[in-house]
Image (tube, rainbow, N blue to C red):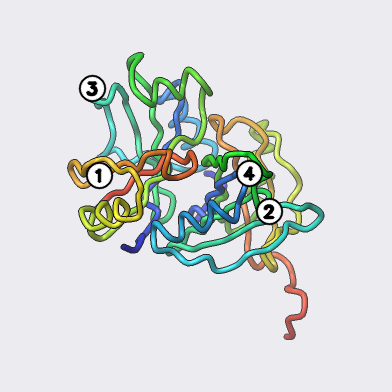
Amino acid sequence: MKAKRIDHVGIVVKDLEAAVATYGRNFGFNADSNRGGEVPALGIKNAFLPVGESDLEFIQPTGEEGPVAQFAKDRGEGTFMLSIEVDDIDGAVEHLRSLGARVGNPNNGIAFVSMKSTHGVNLQLVQR
Amino acid sequence: MGVGATHIDHIVISSNDSGTVAQTFADNLGIEIKRKMIRPGTSAQLAFAKLQEVILEFAGPPEVKPGEEVKARLWGLVVAVDDIDSAVAHLRDLGYNVGDPSKAVQPGAKIATVKAGTAGVPFAMIQYNALPIEGATA
């Protein structure tokens, strides 16, 4: 397995619209209007702000359950997750499991690595 | 108008054992640790790997204290800008508390930290080729 690219950095925010407006107006990072929105299954809404070849993903919890909501309760706002692109998600998961890492089953080209296998870093693998 | 960022330059992963964490990421993800150094004036070790245009920086003590569990967290971001003085002036005009651009650990680079107003994200800007590189000849 070989990591290919930083796909995005997930950032939990309290107010998605305010964060997008601030980063756009003040920093020049503008949200991609073709991506993001409500994701009821995950209890979040999100927006993607391209910066070079990678994105910042702003994530606001919309419910009380799930890791994003828990992060918001514990820490408020901040860097939440690192997403790395791989060529072959199934191969990457198999490789990591062979090393003893705990990894969820891929779903729609995305797999999450247990924080117990990354010393506490919330890590996502994605195949584009 | 913005800070004139071209890309995310590096992402910092902070830990109490930068050597172990860097090696875990290298082993698990097939990335190569290109460089290790002690941050000048501190005992912290920095280890760097690069994934295309983005550098992963592993920062912290070089090894964990005896009896402690290795713990890491995704920390902050540094974006590359074309003109750090203009970027700093722009943000200060908007009321941001931004540190003065100073010499970075990367040769020839200057870095400035934005101290608040970034949605909880430790955030800095870096400009390469901002300073003469020591030892380089014209």
Looking at the figure, which quarter contains the N terminus of chain A?
Answer: bottom left
Q: Is residue B136 left or right of residue A32?
A: right
Q: Chain of mark 1?
A: A
Q: Which residue is mark 2?
A: B111
Label 3: how many residues lie within 10 Å, few (<14), some (14-19) or many (20+)? few
Mark in front: 4 vs 3: 4
Q: Which residue is mark 4?
A: B16
- Image coordinates for residue A4, horizontal then vertical, percent: 35, 61
Q: Chain of mark 3?
A: A
Name the amino acid, label 2: Ile
Q: Earlier in the sequence, mark 3 or mark 1?
A: 3
Hey, which residue is sitting farthest bottom in the picture?
A: B138
Residue at x-position 57% and y-position 49%: B78
Hey, which residue is sitting farthest right in the picture?
A: B41
Residue at x-position 67% and y-position 31%: B95
Query: Looking at the image, which is closer to me, B28 or A34?
Result: B28
Mark 2 vs mark 3, CA separation in Å:
40 Å
Name the amino acid, label 1: Ile
Mark 4 vs mark 1, CA separation in Å:
29 Å
Pointer 3 and pointer 1 on the same chain? yes
Q: Which residue is mark 3?
A: A40
Pointer 2 and pointer 1 on the same chain? no
Q: Is residue A94 left or right of residue A82?
A: left
Hey, which residue is sitting farthest left in the picture?
A: A108
